[in-house]
Amino acid sequence: MYYSDDIVEEVRSKNDIVDVVSGYVKLTKKGRDYFGLCPFHNEKTPSFSVSGYKQMYYCFGCGAGGNVFSFLMEYENYSFLEALEELAKRAGVDLPKQEYSEKDRERANEKETLLEIQKAAAGYYYFKLRNREGETALSYLKNRGLSDDTMNVFGLGYAGKYSSHLYQYLKGKGYADEMIAKAGLITVDEKRGANDRFWNRVMFPIMNANHRVIGFGGRVMGDGTPKYLNSPETLIFDKSRNLYGLNRAKSTRESYFLLCEGYMDVIALHQAGFTNAVASLGTALTVGHASLIRRYVKEVYLIYDSDPAGVRATLRAMPILKEAGLSVKVVRLNPYKDPDEFIKNKGAKAFEERIRDAENGFLFSITASEGDYDMDSPEGKTQFMRETAKRLTEFEEEIERNYYVDAVAKKYGVKAEHLRSLMEKQAIQMGLARPVLRAKSARKSVTEKENGLLQSQKALLTWMTENVSIYRQVKEYLKPEDFSGELYKTVAEMIYRQYEEGQLNPARLINHFTEEEEHRQVAALFHTKLNQLHTVQEQEKALGEMVLRIKQNSLDEATKALDPTDMAGLQRLVEARRQLQKMEKITIRLES
């Protein structure tokens, strides 16, 4: 679905960012900006700023930033279109109707019907648990330590002993057999007809991030099998891309999720006050789960069962989470099997201590592999250290690798230099380039140069939006295409255009981007801290150096890309370098 730039800007301009953010964050005015505690990470000193002048927000602590669309996208986990529609409703802007194809309309209607059926089924199960038929199931849940409030919050229910009552109930509400079957709530047999998929089970409604029921998990009462039964995958339920408890955990103020194995673990943790607990849905952790988690947090604490199967599941999950860009820690529960059992025996405070003592994921995996070797013999321990050294070579970043070398050396009582020597031997055997560290140090200087250039571009763009006189001077020496990277080029081009049209509007500029991460990056371009330069002379000198650095890099890149047979292009570059030499004598003046 597409809306014009004019519509998007109308919605944005009619939603003052200070008013919108004030509905979520307590703001205090300081100077011309507003400050408060960042809603996207825990902090004690306010570093979250909202500018009515720029119509943007930015956190100097975690880097979150953007315009009013970005805020709803990040806080409510909306897509750009969902944020646009919500803000249009808030401002009373009527969005033009979008035409659906017949196929799209049919699919949308089917999804909505399936959601209605799941909601009706959840209500049916909820009622059954709380009447006479559900007494056994209710006693089971209370014996597991769940309060009435917790059961109500999670919408727990009961599927009765008779295998067609839900089917009859849904038929009575007018739903067709085909749709009830597509919802995964019945099975159809030629001889026996339609029967409920779930019966004689405690029911756990599974909700999506927007609190809508999309499926169920059922725990059998008695000795039936399977012990746990989940809804099949449907048009609205993909178990590899949904997490149990996410609808509640997404609002946590913690910077991490507690990732568990089962429904009861999540519910027990939430009841104990750990409202950032989630679980995969009866399946091993997938790339889809990891990507979903990454939308909300950057760190995961794994709390799988402490038995051998739980350890194996932990080891399988860690590389998937790391590949998604998440850092991982492991909470040890010994001597208890799972979070539910631990909290019942030791309480919430002891569980908090286990979280504080959580082990780094890599170190946990090293410890877990000890069982594969005879650690009491010199040969076994040597083999173990060789394998550990091999795994240490997999870290690409030198700083990170050195940290783990020191940590492993300390843990196993070996000298760090001996471990590094063993790593080199393992690297040679695996055919890796040698010496590893020398190659990394060469890359380091390139990285520093790149980081310096990006910082110069960020600072210059910030300064240009703060002071029109700086823009007027800079444009004489730099064109938008002189900036490095597509994002910087695009933003510079839009700033230049807005100034030439007589109205700088950074918040409107962000409308050009629809991804949350792009909003964050663009916002950072307008909020680079400049207060480390105290005097006007220092600031003017820094401005001149930034312009020179950006122009020099632009000419270097143009030289690399030049076709050797392009003589006209070569002449233009020679002339540009002559101009660059003259630029070394100029200063960008700050006008008050």
Image (cartoon, rainbow, N blue to C red):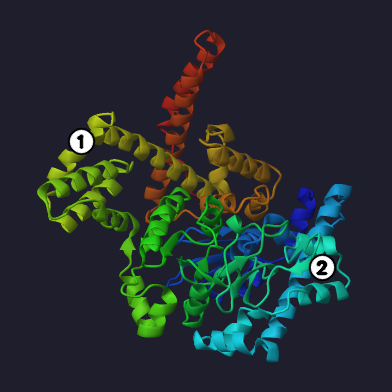
Mark 2, Cα crowd under 10 Å, few <14 / some 14-19 / many 20+, is few
Identify the residue under disc 2.
92
Name the foreground residue: 562 vs 155: 155
Q: Nearer the viewer, residue 119 or 169?
A: 169
Q: Earlier in the sequence, mark 2 or mark 1?
A: 2
Q: Position of residue 202 (x, y in %)?
A: 61, 78
Q: List the residue tagged with mark 1.
A: 424
Residue closest to the eye, 77 or 519: 77
Residue 38 in the image, given as x and y percentages of width and height? 50, 69
Residue 124, above or below 48: below
**Horizontal placement of 206 versus 361: left or right?**
right
Up-down relation of residue 292 to residue 458 (above or below)? below
Amino acid type assigned to the residue bearing label 1 in the image: Glu
Structural crowding at the residue carrying mark 1, measured as other residues with C-alpha within 10 Å and reported as few (<14), some (14–19) or many (≥20)? many
Dot 2 amino acid type: Gly
Specify whether 314 is left or right of 4. Answer: left
For the point 57% across and 66% down, the residue is 50
Q: Residue at x 16, y 48 (%)?
A: 380
Left or right of 224 in this view: 312: left
Image point 67% across, 47% down: which residue?
Answer: 512
